[in-house]
Image (spheres, rainbow, N blue to C red):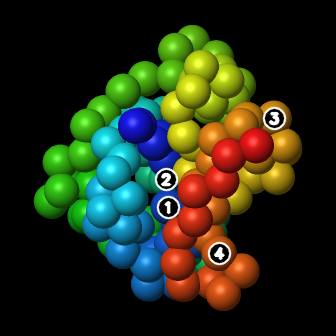
Amino acid sequence: MEVILDTNFIVSCIKKKIDFLTELESMGFKVLLPKEIVEEVKDLRLNSDRNTKVAVEVALDLFRKRKIKGMTLGNKPVDEGLIEFGKKGAYIATLDTAIKRIIPNKIVISDAGNKLEAERS
């Protein structure tokens, strides 16, 4: 099973100190990181609060160290690309309510706030 990471998921996990890569891998997922998401994460360095900027730096460092498999969403807006892959069966790790409503397979942060959950609809 593959899971594609979204920007808001990455930043939120880091802020909550969730080791999302290890958790996802232990759940049996192959983690994929779109180059468009990496660019969105980098862009957060420009106009974000201090906590978000720190989370972004941690994320970028983590991506370099863990060498996560890259991919591309194609020539479309990020959300559309995530939805397209989600409709094809990939799990999408996102906090975006609009995306979560459309795709059947998603990874979310539990209500307890410190664990990941896979959801199928």
**Which of the marked residues, 1 or 3, is nearer the chain's N terminus?**
1
Q: Residue at x 44, y 84 (%)?
A: 17
Give the alpha-carbon distance from disc 2 to disc 3, as whole Å. Answer: 23 Å
Q: Quarter of the image containing the N terminus?
A: top left
Q: Given the image, on which type of amino acid does mark 4 rest? A: Ser
Q: Residue at x 58, y 43 (%)?
A: 92
**Which of the marked residues, 2 or 4, is nearer the chain's N terminus?**
2
> In the image, is residue 108 above or below residue 91?
below
Q: Quarter of the image containing the C terminus?
A: top right
> In the image, is residue 114 above or below residue 8?
below
SS at badge 1: helix
Give the alpha-carbon distance from disc 1 to disc 3, as whole Å. Answer: 20 Å
Q: Given the image, on which type of amino acid does mark 2 rest? A: Val
For residue 27, side relative to residue 7 (left or right): left
Q: Given the image, on which type of amino acid does mark 1 rest? A: Ile
Say which of 29 and 83 sits in front.
29
Instruction: Read off the residue under disc 1.
Output: 10
Q: Residue at x 82, y 52 (%)?
A: 97
The spot of residue 79 in percent (x, y) is: 69, 33
Q: Which mark is residue 102?
A: 3
Q: In this rendering, which labeled residue sits more in front, label 1 or label 4?
A: 4
